[in-house]
Amino acid sequence: MISCVDCDIASMDRSLKQFQNELKTSEVGLFFFAGHGMQIDGENYLAAVDTSRTDESAAKYTSMALNHVIEVMEKSNCATNIIILDACRNNPFERAWTRSMEVQGLASVYAPRGTLIAFATSPGQTASDGEGRNGAYTTALLKHMNTPDCSIETMFKRVRNTLSAATGGTQISWEHTSLAEEFFFNLSLGVRIDLYGDTALSDSLFILDEAKKSNAIIKGLKTLNWAVQNSAVGELTVDVTDKAGTDSLFVVGRNLYQAACGSSNAAMAYLQDFANSSAGMDEAKRKALLDGMLFEMFYDSNAKLRKDFKVHMFEPLFALQRNKDLKSSFDFIAECLLPDATRFYSIPGKALEVAVDVSTQPSSAKSGHHILQTVYYQGSGILWMEDRDYEPDPGKPPMRKTLTLDQFENLLAEQMVVAPRLLKINYDSFVDTGNETIAFPYGWTTRKR
């Protein structure tokens, strides 16, 4: 995402060039502008903070032409381009110019194939700035953009209704569209993922039929009794999986991972040696089991992304990613998580390396012992206090736990949800010999905020 706030025209031009470069590898492009828009000689312009007020000609050449934005997006490889303009306000420079504008608001524009252009008002109309930090249009947009399984056309109709109600019918939003494909801002898992039924994805809805051996295994795994769980894992044979449906095996996988996180020895062993444990199974059945385990880590029983991921068995589960025969399951979880990419440093399943720099201070009390200062990712510190219960009294140092380098690196990988083999760590204050220890503050984390 490229963001430019309160920017001058030079910054706007630079940001558009960056945007143009990003579009080369994207399937969808979205350009959003909130600010002052002007219609000059039938063309639309987006004002910068340093747009000249001298006259129309000066304003034109110190603003960004909307047609330029449209052209950049049209020439990209994106199948879908979306331009949203909360910019149809009164001309801010009208009084400074020698003559008043005869036309207010923004003019109609041509939308190339695969493009939707949304305006805060109908052509020639001006817009309300609203009462909060956003204009009335953006406020209405935020109310509906995240509605699950709502097509973009239906979403903008809802925005229009909300906006009309908020402004007493004085402001009517407007769209020009030539979209060639269906587009949804928020497509729910049940619609995006068609391999498994809703009752498997939302396994709180899954009804057990104990006459089925796979369902009897699920029941055993759901108990809090290790002996029962271990026995259930022992029943998971090739003969059982060959007869079971993929939805049932997906739910088996979910509960198998849950049991492993709960310290069932048999479940942990099955997961850690999954490639051999599942040998001989039908490929689709094997995939369903692993898909279910991966899904359980990130999604709750209602198929909602967890606030706190279930990462107790993260390392051994994602170690399976090195097995090429299991790649399709990691592609599956990556596809599930794609709409929530901002929750991650790198989307799990994509097998992309993440590099961090660790800053420490040597301890004066013990050789080879280092006190963690911060962890840097892409130039920013990502270590922060998550649990304020551990906050020390004023003037007191935080409580810290001593970790070996292996323990520290595994903790970092778990918090960042990056497979240890994909997390590249550079220590800036010492040479890693493997014998060092690090003091890690209690209550702090590198988890993505």
Image (cartoon, rainbow, N blue to C red):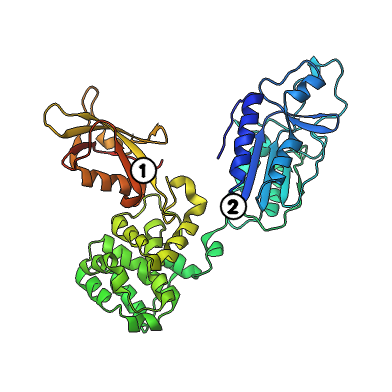
Nearer-the-camera pick, 180 or 191: 180
Above or below 95: residue 117: below
x and y percentages locating residue 166 in the rendered image: 69, 39
Q: How many marks?
A: 2
Dot 2: what SS? loop
User: Residue 440: x and y, percent?
Assistant: 23, 37
Residue 170 sits in which quadrant? top right
Q: Amino acid at mark 1?
A: Arg
Above or below, comparing residue 348 to residue 59 in the picture: below
The residue sitting at 31% across, 68% down in the picture is 256
Give residue 147's mark.
2
Q: Quadrant of the C terminus?
A: top left
Left or right of residue 173: residue 298: left
Could you tell me if residue 164 is visible in this image? no
> Disc 2 to disc 1, how far (Cα)?
27 Å
Instruction: Where is residue 267? Give x, y as percent.
Output: 26, 68
Q: Quadrant of residue 95?
A: top right
Name the amino acid, label 2.
Answer: Thr
Question: Residue 115 placed where, x, y %?
Answer: 72, 49
Q: Nearer the viewer, residue 139 or 92?
A: 92
* Residue 447 - label: 1
The answer to whether 108 is drawn above or below residue 391 in the figure is below
Earlier residue among tags 2 and 1: 2
In-image side of 157 versus 7 (left or right): right
